[in-house]
Amino acid sequence: MAQITAALVKELREKTGAGMMDCKKALSDTDGDLDAAVDWLRKKGLSAAEKKSSRVAADGLVGVAAGGTAGAVAEINSETDFVARNELFQDFVRNVAELALANEGDQDAVLAAGYPNTDRTVAEQLTHNIATIGENQSVRRMECLSVTDGVVAPYVHNAAAENVGKIGVLVALESTGDKAKLEALGKQIAMHVAAASPLGLTEADIDQEVVAREEAIFKDQALASGKPAEIVEKMMVGRMRKYFEQVVLLKQTFVIDGERSIEKVVADLAKELGTDVKLTGYARFQLGEGIEKEESDFAAEVAQAVNG
């Protein structure tokens, strides 16, 4: 039997909004497996927020760069938000994004590339920045999107300066139609992506393990209601359809008008332009997502320093 610590209970409460005793019971019944405990609470209807995100655990900035038929997004991390407000750091993020665009998102090629207006590589410039600013930094990830004809529209949410912020998005629209109108819609869809955080462009792009997990939870919830198996199967079809409408970009309701699906929005523009328009891809980088940051007791650290 795994030890159920107060810290583990606290983490589960923050993820789900469920009560302390329910969280302890969930962890006890799942042998301390946090993900399984989340599912346990959801099946019991005790999770107040099924998709509540854990706190962002890293600082720094996300930068975007775009040039007509291509765009790039890059995340550069730092230890504190103070560094993210430093102009030297902001320039570095912008330059890395531009180099990611020039090198088609190849991170090794970017790190080996010459850094603008210096005799250093990007990797050497990063080391120089660490020594100059006095705080650890890292080039975490980057991605590039392109189309044969059309636009790749960039968007930065919570911008700290030009082309850098907390969330960076790219949206790729393939079309021979009017570039200004494509760019305008691309930016609106990028704003939607920043807000709605889809899991994939189409149903096929969603991780099948995630889909199977949702199906299992929905099925257990339906069976717990006591309904016959044939009714449960019909319920499952409707519930999964609703799930995909929440997480698949093309199926999501456009946040700008609150009525049409993204798929319908793109089709409407194609009709207006008199030519095909296809949303071929998107990229969404949110600062620090997926990084776990060790929490520390500042008072205890000070006391330890004073006491040697």
Image: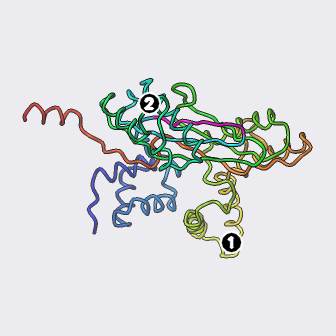
Q: Kindly give the residue lying farthest to the front in the view shown.
A: 119
Q: Residue 219, relative to residue 71: is it above or below? A: below
Q: Residue 136, relative to residue 202: is it above or below? A: above
Coloring scheme of the render?
rainbow
Residue 44, position as x, y percentages in the image: 50, 60
Horizontal side of residue 307 vs 250, given as left or right = left
Query: Which quadrant does the N terminus fall into?
Result: bottom left
Check residue 67 for magenta coloring.
yes
Residues shaded magenta: 61-68
Residue 254, position as x, y percentages in the image: 73, 42
The tag on residue 233 is 1
Query: Could one spot residue 225 in this view of the protein?
Result: no
> Hey, which quadrant is residue 112 in on the image?
top left
CA neighbours of label 1 inside 10 A, class few (<14), some (14 to 19), many (20+): some
Horizontal side of residue 307 vs 184, given as left or right = left
Query: Could one spot residue 234 in this view of the protein?
Result: yes
Q: Kindly give the residue lying farthest to the bottom in the view shown.
A: 229
Q: Residue at 34% across / 57% down in the picture?
A: 24
